[in-house]
Image (tube, grey):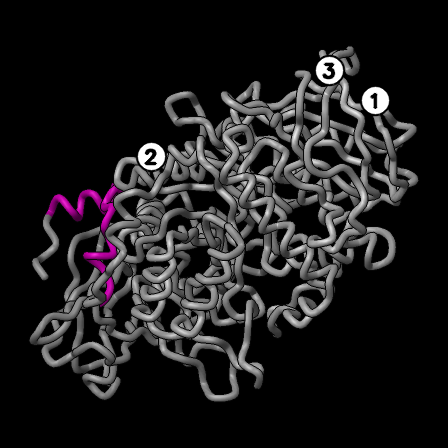
């Protein structure tokens, strides 16, 4: 490994050493290992590990550079892949042993404990042989705006488990997960954070090792094998990425060189009140560089197809969840440094990896999140549509008899549907903390719950925007999600749950095969009728170049025979799907096959269909 050039040191100081993970950390060769660590205010640093019996006097590190660009390095002969190590950092009269901020692998926990023992790094080999060339050559980034994107969100520790309750490993998950996602018709999986985290109950959002996949399910090579296998099956992989905050474990990033370094020095800005974590200091160029390099690392070294940025709103607002806060230099609440960092990361990702997706979980009305930076936006490709999620779930949660009073919740998201490139997310956040499962949120008995859930999913696939569904929701998981157990797969022995699963599979198939549904541009959607409050029926059309799809919803449990529905053209219309079909766990009521639209004017359309609307159901029709 060559010495760090003066130019690279300059780039590090400017926050633009994009591949910093190739410079810092532990990098082994045949004779030994180079170690480098950023600790600019330390008085001395040593590397300790298996190779020197953890004695700090054996391998003191050399100081390179000055000021806040200063780092430490040493070459240790005999240090090899598999050896554990830490950096021992001296400040004044005290020493503290720290894990490597750029560590590629972390050691397993103490037997019977949850925390990573000492957070020691492991010198990790980099000899994995990828075999996903076919996927990598055709994967889509911005082109996905015109394609079907249907994401299955997965928490690896609780999707499935062994009968004794232990985790499946990355290798054990690879085949069943890929086969299931492929069978269900999803285009991507989104993995909840796999970056190393001591507290399993944080679901991966309280990180200590941003460059290391968690030890819980196997080695870094095992994780690469999982991704490789998904790619071979034609399935994209999106990583839930955590750039907003980090865990406060003392041997992690906090006060790394004896003072706040990765976190804000201002105690008001440093502590995140919601999660008990520390906030990255976006004003420091090296910290911005650290996060930029981490994003590129996962896209490069792990062939990740996209990053979903967690908690973007908490990054953008200096007063987020705070009563006391420090204004920016203009007196405002916006975090200008975070804004610029997000723009830089997105610009760099699109420059280096044009096919990558960058997705923002941003829960406010911040303008231009998914607009290009040259138009004043933040540069994300997609933004989660939290407003659609809230309003839609609120509407379908209502008792059917009251829905006619809540049409605003159903219709309002279309007012702003094209303000951003939206992704419609029904994520893990909606099935935790006492909120219940998607199935459990629906009103009525189990049959009605399943019918309402299928109808809501039908609207999700009919509404403009890409799709994301959390694991278990696709078959109507009954219990609220818990990270401590696998999903209730036994529910698939019941018709309504097996039928709900079949419905989601059918929706994915229609979505992927329909140009009208893949088209999310302005003009792809028209309301047909949203005024029939008395019957609680609504309808809309999705418009494509060569086809139109008509969606008709009956929000009540009352079947409606001979319901007159406006249609754009006369002739035969074919019922592609009815959510009340027996194969989907329904009653089999409602129109099926071909239906004739006769000349006449209704709902400002040129033709009229006579439909039998199933109870608590949706019909999806296409011109035959």
Mark in front: 1 vs 3: 3
Residues marked 3 and 2 touching at CB (< 8 Å): no
Residue 577, given in percent of the width and then of the height, sits at 66, 41
Q: Give SS at disc 2.
A: helix
Q: Choose the circle earlier in sequence order: 3 or 2.
A: 2
Figure quadrant of residue 458 = top right
Q: Residue at x 78, y 29 (%)?
A: 538
Q: Give SS at disc 1.
A: strand
* Mark 1 nearby-residue class (10 Å; few <14, some 14–19, many ≥20): some
On screen, residue 157 above or below 2: below
Residue topped by disc 1: 531
Foreground of the two, 404 or 1: 404
What is the number of the mark on residue 347?
2
Foreground of the two, 493 or 571: 571
* Mark 3 nearby-residue class (10 Å; few <14, some 14–19, many ≥20): many
| Spatial CA span between label 1 and label 3 | 18 Å
Foreground of the two, 124 or 94: 124
* Mark 2 nearby-residue class (10 Å; few <14, some 14–19, many ≥20): some
Q: Choose the circle earlier in sequence order: 2 or 1.
A: 2
Residue 570, given in percent of the width and then of the height, sits at 68, 16
On screen, residue 499 above or below 16: below
Q: Which residues are magenta?
A: 6-26
Figure quadrant of residue 25 = bottom left
What is the number of the mark on residue 607?
3
**How many badges with numbers are in the image?**
3
Residue 410 relative to residue 276: left or right: right
| Magenta residue check for 109 | no
| Spatial CA span between label 3 and label 2 | 49 Å
> Does any portion of residue 257 appear in the rendered image?
no
């Amino acid at each position: 490994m060559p010495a760090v050039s003066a130019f690279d040191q300059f780039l590090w100081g400017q926050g633009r050493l994009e591949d910093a993970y190739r410079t810092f950390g532990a990098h082994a060769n045949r004779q030994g290992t180079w170690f480098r660590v950023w600790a600019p205010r330390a008085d001395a640093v040593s590397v300790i590990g298996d190779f020197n019996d953890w004695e700090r006097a054996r391998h003191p590190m050399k100081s390179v550079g000055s000021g806040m660009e200063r780092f430490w390095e040493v070459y240790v002969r005999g240090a090899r892949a598999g050896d554990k190590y830490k950096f021992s950092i001296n400040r004044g009269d005290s020493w503290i042993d720290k894990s490597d901020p750029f560590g590629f692998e972390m050691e397993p926990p103490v037997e019977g404990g949850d925390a990573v023992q000492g957070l020691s790094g492991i010198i990790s080999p980099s000899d994995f042989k990828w075999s996903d060339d076919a996927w990598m050559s055709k994967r889509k980034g911005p082109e996905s705006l015109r394609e079907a994107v249907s994401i299955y969100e997965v928490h690896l520790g609780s999707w499935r488990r062994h009968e004794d309750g232990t985790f499946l490993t990355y290798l054990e998950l690879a085949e069943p997960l890929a086969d299931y996602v492929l069978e269900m018709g999803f285009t991507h999986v989104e993995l909840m954070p796999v970056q190393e985290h001591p507290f399993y109950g944080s679901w991966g959002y309280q990180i200590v090792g941003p460059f290391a996949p968690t030890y819980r399910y196997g080695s870094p090579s095992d994780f690469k094998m999982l991704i490789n296998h998904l790619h071979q099956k034609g399935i994209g992989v999106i990583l839930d990425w955590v750039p907003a905050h980090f865990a406060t474990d003392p041997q992690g990033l906090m006060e790394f060189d004896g003072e706040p370094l990765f976190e804000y020095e201002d105690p008001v800005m440093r502590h995140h009140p919601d999660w008990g974590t520390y906030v990255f200091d976006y004003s420091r160029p090296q910290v911005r560089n650290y996060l930029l390099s981490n994003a590129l690392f996962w896209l490069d070294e792990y062939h990740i197809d996209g990053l979903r940025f967690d908690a973007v709103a908490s990054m953008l607002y200096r007063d987020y969840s705070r009563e006391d806060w420090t204004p920016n230099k203009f007196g405002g609440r916006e975090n200008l440094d975070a804004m610029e960092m997000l723009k830089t990361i997105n610009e760099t990702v699109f420059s280096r990896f044009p096919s990558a997706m960058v997705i923002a979980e941003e829960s406010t009305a911040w303008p231009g999140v998914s607009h290009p930076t040259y138009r004043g936006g933040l540069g994300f490709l997609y933004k989660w549509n939290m407003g659609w999620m809230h309003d839609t779930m609120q509407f379908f949660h209502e008792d059917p008899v009251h829905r006619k009073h809540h049409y605003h919740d159903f219709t309002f998201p279309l007012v702003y549907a094209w303000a951003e490139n939206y992704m419609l997310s029904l994520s893990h956040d909606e099935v935790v903390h006492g909120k219940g499962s998607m199935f459990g949120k629906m009103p009525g008995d189990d049959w009605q719950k399943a019918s309402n859930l299928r109808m809501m999913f039908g609207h999700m696939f009919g509404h403009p925007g890409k799709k994301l569904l959390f694991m278990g929701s696709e078959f109507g998981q009954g219990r609220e999600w818990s990270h401590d157990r696998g999903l209730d797969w036994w529910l698939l022995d019941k018709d309504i749950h097996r039928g709900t699963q079949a419905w989601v599979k059918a929706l994915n198939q229609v979505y992927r095969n329909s140009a009208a549904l893949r088209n999310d541009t302005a003009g792809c959607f028209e309301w047909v009728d949203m005024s029939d409050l008395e019957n609680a029926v609504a309808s809309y059309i999705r418009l494509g170049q060569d086809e139109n799809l008509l969606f008709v919803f009956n929000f009540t449990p009352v079947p409606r025979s001979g319901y007159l529905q406006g249609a754009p053209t006369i002739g035969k219309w074919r019922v592609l799907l009815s959510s009340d079909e027996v194969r989907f766990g329904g009653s089999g009521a409602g129109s099926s096959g071909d239906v004739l639209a006769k000349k006449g004017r209704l709902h400002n359309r040129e033709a009229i269909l006579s439909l039998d609307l199933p109870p608590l159901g949706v019909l999806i029709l296409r011109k035959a």
